[in-house]
Amino acid sequence: MRSVLLLAVLLAGCSTPVNAATPAEGAHDVVIYGGTCAAVTAAVQTKKMGKTVIVVSPDKHLGGLSSGGLGFTDTGNKAVIGGLSREFYQRIWKHYNEDAAWKWQKKEEYGNKGQGTPAIDGENRTMWIFEPHAAERVFEDFVKEHQIPVVRDELLDRAKGVKKDGAQITSITTLSGKTYTGKMFIDATYEGDLMAAAGVDYHVGREANSIYDEKWNGVQVGILHHQHHFGTMNISPYVIPGDPKSGLLPRITAEKPGEYGSGDKKVQAYCYRMCLTDKEENRIPFPKPDGYDPKQYELLLRVFEKGWRQTFNKFDPIPNHKTDTNNHGPFSTDNIGMNYDYPDASYERRKEILKEHETYQKGWLYFIANDPRVPKDVQEAMQKWGLPKDEFVDNGGWSHQIYVREARRMIGSYVMTENELLKRRPTPDSVGMGSYTIDSHNIQRYVTPEGHVQNEGDIGVGLKGPYEIAYGALVPKKGQANNLFVPVCVSSSHIAFGSIRMEPVFMILGESSATAAAMAIDADIAVQDVPYAKLREKLLKDGQVLEYTGPQKAGGVKKGLEFRALPGVVVDDEQAKTTGEWQIGSSQPNYVGDGYRAARKGEPATARYEARLPAAGKYEVRLSYSVNPNRATNATVEIHHAGGIEKVKVDQTKAAPIEGAFISLGVFEFSTDKPATVVVSNEGATGYVIADAVQWVEKK
């Protein structure tokens, strides 16, 4: 008897995570299906709430994309990341605070570049940029420390594996025959498989703008927000340039893109967030994938022929001479149009889609590094990179998690739309916050009426500031599933999900879901009936951020200055007439209105501001911009006044002295017989040129 008790004590203290071979079937308070970052935070919070929990993961590795290559975190305003989500980044900081973590690079050599703000925040002991293996270690530590059972490589039987008693899910069964019963269930997958199998309403693709009274949701033909399109390159889509009879090049559809604002069933492109290295001792040369076909990349050659040289612009540095490499440009790692059936596809079909994506992306790398037709400067630069030997060691250095940017989205008790994100209407019952730019990657590549190739669907819309996420977005409509939470495939429109879908937010929502699940168990009520006041109290106690009331400073998104309250005549960037490529942003503080526009150096871009002044006379002309080290030191501004044209160079790396946002361009005489005009351009720019607002203040 004594030996049995001793064995029980030893097992209870075991730090090895429970794997698929460990018997863990049976009843649990909470059953979590998924292996994402949201699954882990939900499991940890469930244990903290005093409930039993099991994680049934369809994957071998924990953390989803956070441990699968996305190490250059899309954070937005870091001040609204709280609770276990913030603890994750604090643990990352702790890891990199040890000298042993810096194997291939000295810490001081790494620098401190992050998503608009420093990667390492020593004051708050957080770090936002990391290697995949470091993130996976944190997730594994979470489950070890809280003794959370995890079964891996267990796929839900989507056809008959979800048992319900009325609106209550009673159990789930995997394809291997294992059954898990629970009082509450959490679907923490990127695909929403449990949600769908439970009969909950969901949507795939883009809703028409008319459905939720939105602007940025439906088909966006003619909208070119980022650099991920062909712009004015005027590239022929045909095998023989200019000859439609020769047929289309690979990866271009002959289908019409649809009318602006209309809905469709198409899904934004997926890719693998690659971890690459240029450290020779740790580098695996890019392999030639099975099924490699150089014809698939003919369109890329035509892009290079136009002089495009931005291949490496999203090789974002993470520690130890590695990158988080993301899609960038008109023909890049995003596999546009090849994933439409993925959300609802069978497991077998999904494997085919994933394999095709892997072949395409590995082929893209191999093509650039080896095909003799690739420009020499690009090829030589690519040959310095390779896959890391010490990441994804069981998969040849290749990520185990594709970037499922969007799959199914629940239609739940409350649907989040761009109207909540852009503060057009209030959000009820906040359970967490988001703050990243409203963002969608391209959805289709088609032929324009003029006979050129073009991408469609890429959107980047700045926010006024952080926004709340409603509790109702985590739960189904009452009567469909009364004991289910969905913190990843949340109830939202396509374009709202484009901001919500960030990994820190998923961790936040996973924790909030678990807190509410425990409360629903204690009160023996449906998840839709959890009293928000009590939930809110507990979330705040645990460090979740439910509203943003903190200081507006660098490192967070500042609500823009209200231009109608500014003196004189003000024209914001939304009223400016633009040419060329301008991104819409709001990640840096001190701007007017809802955001600002940014143009890279390179292809010409202008923003023309025109105003009818109330009277002729002298006016001080001011320009607003958001400061950042990556700005141009020589942004070109032309002031068209009564005496002619004055050209001024503005150093936008230096803080603007007026209101923290404006700089004076000088005092000029203006007449009233024609508009007062200011033109901002990126002519000869050394960095990003910001076009925000122009102000004319009369001088008596």
Image (cartoon, grey):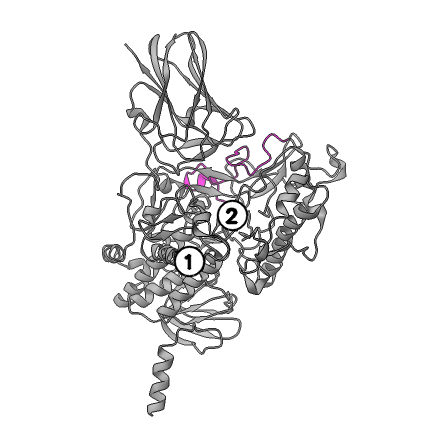
Ranked by sequence position, the earlier of labels 1 and 2 is 1
Where residue 335 is drawn, which disc sits there?
none
Provide residue 86's location: percent of width, then percent of height.
34, 54
Q: Is residue 220 magenta?
A: yes
Q: Is residue 375 magenta?
A: no
Nearer to us: label 1 or label 2: 1
Label 1 environment density (alpha carbons within 10 Å; few <14, some 14–19, many ≥20): few
- In the rendered structure, the answer to whether residue 636 lies left or right of residue 562 reads right
Residue designated by label 2: 205
Against 132, residue 219 (above or below) is above
Could you say which quadrant of the image residue 626 lies in? top left
Please state the extent of the stretch shown in magenta in the rendering. Answer: 206-233
Distance in Å between CA atoms under marks 1 and 2: 46 Å
Where residue 99 is drawn, which disc sits there?
1
Q: What residue lies at 45% left-to-right and 74% top-to-bottom? A: 179
Badge 2 marks a residue whose secondary structure is loop
Badge 1 marks a residue whose secondary structure is helix
